[in-house]
Amino acid sequence: MLVHQIFWSFANKKLNEIPDFRESTRKTKKYCEENGFTYKMWDLESCENLIDEYFPHYRDLWDSFRYPIQKCDFIRYCILYNFGGIYLDCDVHPIREMKYLFDKDYFLVRWNDSYLPYNAIMGFQQGHPLLLDIMSHCEESTKEKQKMEIYEKWKGRLVFQTTGHFMIQRVLKKNKIPARDLLNIVSVWNTCKNTMVFPPNNQGLFMDGNTSAWYSAEEFKKSIKPNWQDLRK
């Protein structure tokens, strides 16, 4: 049973210099040790090696990504396809028993107040074909949208549409996977962003700090809130 996390510097900061990342990864490592799970932290070099060894046909796509976070998004799909397991962002850690998730063919999650998938927490069995669709659609979306002038201005919109949750939403729609299949098992707490979301009936298995090392709160406000409906397209 594998638990994967990914970190490399996006803003010239080490992991230990980002408090939420430091504490959440520490808690995730401790959880894995106590429950007999194998923990793997992927750095940029190990991600590059994975692309070159197992996904050389995506090397041009990898090099074409405009922002490092697109690489971080994309490589998590490659990691899960090649090795299986559960992926967690660095500001996420388990808070309750979640071993049963490893028995699922795959799982994707949502926040309690949204039916959109998001890729901070996900799990797949090794070689799951849905990941091939996701990787393929990343390539298709990147080639299409990085040519569009509007995406030169809206960083968040480009990331979410090419490698993030709006891209995943289109893949789920294509595969006729309903939004109700997304697991409502995430608790979110970020006092800096005034974000507090809790699933009902104590279903929260993970705590998500909703902390970004690549996208400022000001960028989030400018890019997302005024254009929320547009982003669903």
Image (spheres, rainbow, N blue to C red):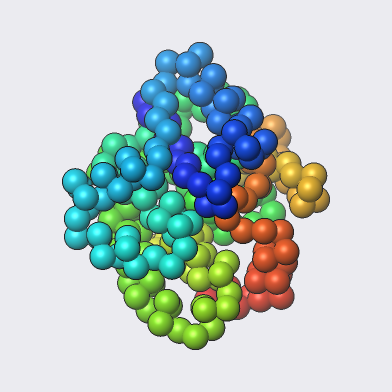
The residue at the far bottom in this view is 149
Residue at horizontal 63%, vertical 37%?
17
Q: Say which residue appears at 37% left-offset and 79% top-offset.
A: 144
Q: Is residue 129 left or right of residue 222?
A: left
Question: On the picture, is 162 further left or further right than 130?
Answer: right
Q: Position of residue 183 (x, y in %)?
A: 54, 44
Q: Position of residue 204 (x, y in %)?
A: 64, 35
Q: Where's residue 205, x and y in %?
A: 60, 32
- Residue drawn at the location 74% of the way across and 44% of the way down: 190
Residue 172 in view, yes or no: yes
Residue 24 x, y percent position in the rendering: 61, 32
Q: Quadrant of residue 63?
A: bottom left
**Residue 224, quarter of picture:** bottom right
Above or below: residue 151 compared with residue 88 = below
Position of 62 relative to 213 (above/below): below
| 179 up-or-down from 196: above or below | below
Q: Residue at x 32, y 60 (%)?
A: 62
Q: Nearer the viewer, residue 48 or 193?
A: 48
The foreground one among 65 and 197 is: 65
